[in-house]
Image (tube, rainbow, N blue to C red):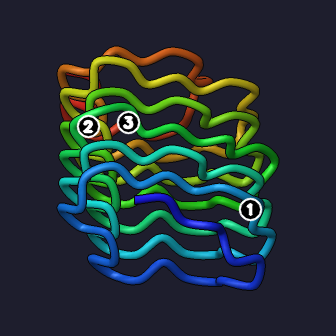
Amino acid sequence: MGLEMLPDLETIGNQAFAEVGTVTFSGDNRSLKTIGIDAFGGATAVVGLHTLPALVTIWDGAFKEATNTVEFGIKNTKLTTIGKSAFAEATAVKGLETLPALVTIGDGAFPKVREVKFSGMNKSLTTIGDGAFAEATVEGLPDMVTKGNRAFS
């Protein structure tokens, strides 16, 4: 499913594209603030979410069980929260770069993800939830204050 990104869209709602196969976005969105609960849950692939400077929250289960790569181009956003099970069992998550405002990664956010790449993160990240990266391969996380139970195992 190919979609032109609406420049004034502020929210991708709960279950908006759940179980739909491949979702490909084109164009920029400078207004998107929220990706809802289970918004892309079970989608085959999600690509083209680029230039999202206003993004604040990726809610619980937003990309849960996406069977192929979830590809972002998220840089220098206002993203503060990645919710519980946001990317649980997704195959790979790429393009989470330079997230100066990220404070919390929720419980079980990235378990069993073969490849999670962060880059350019600063010290704002203070909490990683229980089992957030269980059985996942992670690169680029800074030292942080609080790690949940079995956060990386």
First in sequence: mark 3 or mark 1?
1
Residue at 79% across, 61% down = 53
Front-lying residue, 39 or 145: 39
- Secondary structure under the numbered disc 1 in the rendered image: loop
Residue at 29% across, 58% down = 84
Q: Residues within 10 Å of mark 1 (few under 14, many from 20)?
A: some
73 is higher (above) or lower (below) than 13: above
Front-lying residue, 89 or 127: 89
CB under 8 Å between discs 3 and 1: no
Residue at 47% across, 63% down = 58
- Secondary structure under the numbered disc 3 in the rendered image: strand
Q: Which residue is mark 3?
A: 147
In the displayed structure, does residue 45 sit left or right of residue 19? right
To which quarter of the image does residue 86 belong?
Answer: bottom left
Whether residue 130 appears in this view of the structure is no
Whether residue 38 appears in this view of the structure is yes
First in sequence: mark 2 or mark 3?
2
CB under 8 Å between discs 2 and 3: no
Q: Which residue is mark 2?
A: 90
The quadrant the N terminus occupies is: bottom left
Residue at 24% across, 61% down = 20
In the displayed structure, does residue 84 sit left or right of residue 27? left
Q: CA distance from mark 3 to mark 1?
A: 22 Å
Q: Amino acid at mark 3?
A: Lys
Q: Which residue is mark 1?
A: 78
Q: Amino acid at mark 1?
A: Lys
Q: Nearer the viewer, mark 2 or mark 3?
A: 2
Q: Residues within 10 Å of mark 2 (few under 14, many from 20)?
A: many
Residue 76: percent from left, percent from top: 81, 48
